[in-house]
Image (tube, rainbow, N blue to C red):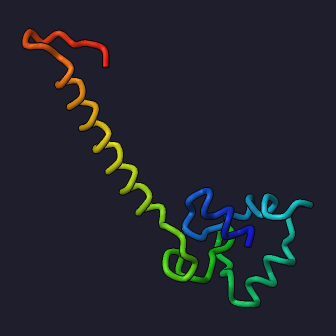
């Protein structure tokens, strides 16, 4: 469970680097537990750590990093457009801006 939480928080789409293993358990790295998760088919061993063996967005119910970035970009554009409109609405006919 901690691996899923760590991966979601760091937006790694289910990837858990070897260096992160120590953060998943309160007493430090537990390689034997990682091996048990691999044996159970829940994690896959990869070159630099582990990968959750389930589909990150469908089976784990997590939002992918790519989807989060698209949402953030949409939010930036929407907020920028709102700010620009607000600035335009607050100026007089001579172009002087008034505090809003």
- Taking the spot 69% from the left edge, 89% from the top edge, the residue there is 41
- Taking the spot 74% from the left edge, 68% from the top edge, the residue there is 2
For this rendering, which residue is in front, 57 or 34?
A: 57
For this rendering, which residue is in front, 17 or 52?
A: 52
* Image quadrant containing the N terminus: bottom right
For this rendering, which residue is in front, 83 or 17?
A: 83
Identify the image quadrant of residue 33: bottom right
Horizontal arrangement in the rendering, residue 84 relative to residue 71 (left or right): left
- Taking the spot 79% from the left edge, 63% from the top edge, the residue there is 24
Outermost left residue: 93
Residue 95, position in %: x, y? Answer: 12, 12
- Taking the spot 76% from the left edge, 89% from the top edge, the residue there is 39
Residue 38, position in %: x, y? Answer: 73, 84
Residue 75, position in %: x, y? Answer: 35, 47
Residue 41 vs 89, above or below: the answer is below
Identify the image quadrant of residue 91: top left
């Amino acid at each position: 469970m901690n691996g899923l939480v760590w991966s979601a928080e760091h937006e790694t789409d289910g990837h858990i680097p070897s260096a992160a293993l120590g953060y998943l358990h309160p007493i430090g790295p537990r390689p034997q537990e990682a091996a048990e998760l691999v044996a159970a088919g829940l994690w896959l061993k990869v070159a630099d750590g582990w990968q959750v063996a389930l589909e990150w967005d469908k089976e784990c119910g997590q939002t992918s990093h790519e989807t989060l970035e698209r949402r953030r970009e949409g939010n930036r554009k929407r907020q920028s457009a709102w700010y620009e409109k607000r600035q335009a609405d607050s100026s007089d006919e001579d172009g002087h801006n008034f505090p809003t």
